[in-house]
Amino acid sequence: MLNFLWMLLAFAVLTGIAMVFYTHGRYSSVEGLLLAMGTVILVLLAAGAAQAFPIGFIVLLVLGGYGLLSFLLGKKQPLLSRRSFRRRDFFSPGYVLILAGFLYAVIAFAGNFLRHWDEFHQWGLAVRYMLETGKLPIYNDFLGGPHNPAGTGLFHLFFQLFSGLNIGNMHASSFLLVWGGMMLPTFRLTWKDWKRALLYAVIVYFSYFVLYYYPYTNLYTDMPLGAWAGGLCAWWCLRRDRRHALLLPGIVLFLLPLIKWQVGALFSFACLFFMAIILLIQENRPWKEHFTRASLKRHAKAGHITAFILFFLISLLGMYIWTLLIRLVAENPYTAGAITPIQPVAEPDRIPRTILACLRSFAISKLSREATIPMSISLFLALVSLVGWFLHKNMREEKFRRLYRWVLTWVMIGFGVYFLCIVYSYVTTFPYDESVRAASMFRYYSIYAAFTLPIFLMPYVRPREEILPAETQEDVKKGKWIKRTALAMLVFLLCNLNGSFIYCASHLNNDQILDYNHIERIAEASPEILDIVQGEKVYMIRQGDTNKPLSIALYYFQHQVNQRGSTPWQFNEKGCQMGNQQYSSPTIYDLPAYLLQGGYGYVWIYSTDAYLNENLPKAVVCDSIVDGGLYRVTPEGDGVRLTLVGQF
């Protein structure tokens, strides 16, 4: 209960910051919330660069308090508000739906463990590192990848500063990032349109289950990136007051590269291109007239060219800010090596094999492993094209019909460009074994699917006053077909639900999670082991086909456990496994040297096998080898003795 109250307080502060934008600018509550989320990330980024998270936290509290005062007293105290407003308008259907989504996530994800590989050694670890050290995860002592921007992690940190380290709260704030971005297109809907807002929200919520490999409960940055980019483009199409159209896209374009490295920058520039195209479409002129001298003068006079130059510079700054922080603030040379492309000179078959793998992934790879009906990106785009064409045919407003047709056309063209960029990235920057099988490419497809979704659903979030009243029986029939299409989409999404939905969308049935036995075992054993070892280092051995237990242990033990990529985690007849590779050396007989030189006080044999049972006693002095055995390391002669002190 106490945790729920802390999270509610955090959302209240977020709402207070949103109220600053609501009372001082022409922004709705939904726009204000997204701006508030961006403000949280920016303030904590600046504070983290100065190693002053507490100061950034205080600034956010003050902003939230000021926004609340402006909202409550601004109508009587002009100094607290720069415009007239109605308080009840703040609590729009979009705001209520975002709040409802947040409350659902806090309750549903309470008590969760981290679930997925990268969460343990990157995304969850980064949040814990920032909370415990007060530094951005850009320094050499951060065990994850410092080159991965922690934009989403900073948002999670905001809630952790209220509640303390809590994995369920991380999942709740991660869901809020996706949900907030997806709900942005509802910014103009009032309570007269609450059914539209609810229908849109329900379709978006169940689409998450169909469009992502790890739906709902994850800390991955893929869906937040797609949701914010797609939400921005849909917002740009639906906006009405163009005089105040700079701040929100400026913040989002800056933050996209901070949400996901490289791909975020690609989407930032893609959004910039889409926004320019949408601006031209909304002028409702023949295309050839847009490229004349008179057209350029018209756009320059309107400030469009200046605005887009500014947006471009903001996107460029967002692209390089994290790298600059690593090099200038942390003085960490790691990034220079991390961003150096892999040159495929020695692998002449890399390019054709990678292209074929990417095409195969495009055609058949499932976006979600949980949904009943397999949905590949090719099927998703085909359905969007088909349903979008049908919606377009039944729209009565010619201006919006034209906009919708052209926007969806450019979304399809944009995917072709995006696909080529991803293929190039796999060829030039991915390791050979991942490149030729297009490893995890379905996640990149999911980003584009999330980007497409709010744009595709724009017809359902238009305010009622913009929709022409039906004048003929044919108009009535068209309106009914649009509603029936939404219901058909909802039925299709509901048909995809199955037993997996429960553990994906809540903390229930956790035992169905892949590798849950390892997650639960290490999470429960780590406090006892850490209490025994008292700050000494633990060497973990895992005789099995995956090193995931070491990734899990990294989150809980951090610097007190050996790293799976630089030390052997499995020994076998051929030598050992380090990272995902087999090496001929070191061998089991080099283990004593590793233990002594690395300063390890304990060995945890997480799991053993026949090879280890037979050969470890030849390398060290040891009475018995047991699964889960924690052994004290003591020097003995030229080697070491392992003494069993517990079993976990």
Image: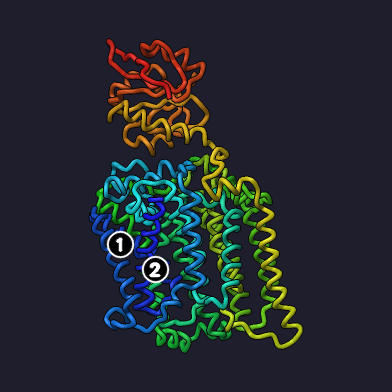
Dot 1 or dot 2, earlier in sequence: 2
Residue at label 2?
Answer: 35
Q: Quadrant of residue 141?
A: top left
Can residue 27 be seen here? The reply is yes
Q: Position of residue 287 (x, y in %)?
A: 57, 82
Residue in the image at 62% along x and 56% along y = 377
Q: Nearer the viewer, residue 387 or 188?
A: 188
Q: Nearer the viewer, residue 300 or 318?
A: 318
Residue at label 1?
Answer: 43
Name above or below for residue 74 compared with residue 418. Answer: below
Q: Nearer the viewer, residue 22 or 110?
A: 110
Q: Residues within 10 Å of mark 2 (few under 14, many from 20)?
A: many
On residue 171, the disc is none
Name above or below for residue 597 compared with residue 260. Answer: above
Can residue 333 be seen here? The reply is no
Q: Position of residue 153 (x, y in %)?
A: 38, 53
Compute the Cα span from label 1 to label 2.
Answer: 12 Å
Q: Quadrant of residue 514?
A: top right
Q: Residues within 10 Å of mark 1 (few under 14, many from 20)?
A: some
Q: Position of residue 327 (x, y in %)?
A: 27, 52
